[in-house]
Image (cartoon, rainbow, N blue to C red):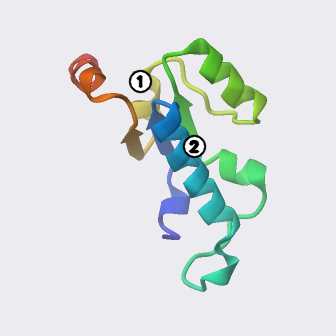
Amino acid sequence: MNEIKKRKIGFIGCGQMGESLLSSFINLFLNSSHDDSIESIGSFSQVQNLFYLYDINPDTRKKLSAKGFKNIGFSEREILENSSIVFNCVKPQHIDNIITNN
């Protein structure tokens, strides 16, 4: 698990599924002091810097920015280029388009 914290984690799609996964990662990294195998990362802003986020909806990107996330992309490609791990959190009918265009 500590190895994951050394990487940039990308999310393509930050709707219900993406936001739920993102929240789970944040909670794990912030509250990992109970597990000796997982080193706590520190502050919320430090945890936020681990993630590169993209959503097709500009309003969702604005909300993420308002929550303090700094690494918000404007395309799927930007997330793919800046992340070593990527979670594709889009509806199944959109996956082919993302894979084909990137």
Q: Quadrant of the C terminus?
A: top left
Residue 34 placement, left or right of 13? right
**Which image quadrant for residue 64?**
top right
Pinpoint residue 85: horizontal percent, then vertical percent.
40, 48
Pinpoint residue 98: horizontal percent, then vertical percent.
29, 22
Pinpoint residue 52: horizontal percent, then vertical percent.
55, 37
Residue 39's place in the image compared with 15, above or below, is below
Residue 50 placement, left or right of 3? right
Q: Which residue is mark 1?
A: 76
Under mark 2, the amino acid is: Phe
Residue 102 placement, left or right of 11? left
Pinpoint residue 56: horizontal percent, then vertical percent.
48, 17
- What is the crowding at mark 2: few (fewer than 14 residues within 10 Å), some, or many (at least 20)? many
Q: Which residue is mark 2?
A: 51
Residue situated in front as seen by the camera: 2 or 61: 61
Residue situated in front as seen by the camera: 101 or 28: 28
Residue 95 placement, left or right of 1? left
Q: Which mark is residue 41?
A: none
Q: Residue furthest bottom?
A: 36
Residue 58's place in the image compared with 91, above or below, is above
Name the element at disc 1. Answer: helix
Under mark 1, the amino acid is: Glu
The mark that comes first in sequence, 1 or 2, is 2
Q: Residue at x 52, y 32 (%)?
A: 14
Q: CA distance from mark 1 to mark 2?
A: 14 Å
Q: Residue furthest front?
A: 16
**Which image quadrant for residue 40?**
bottom right
Name the element at disc 2. Answer: strand
Q: Residue at x 40, y 36 (%)?
A: 89
Q: Are marks 1 and 2 in contact (CB under 8 Å)?
A: no
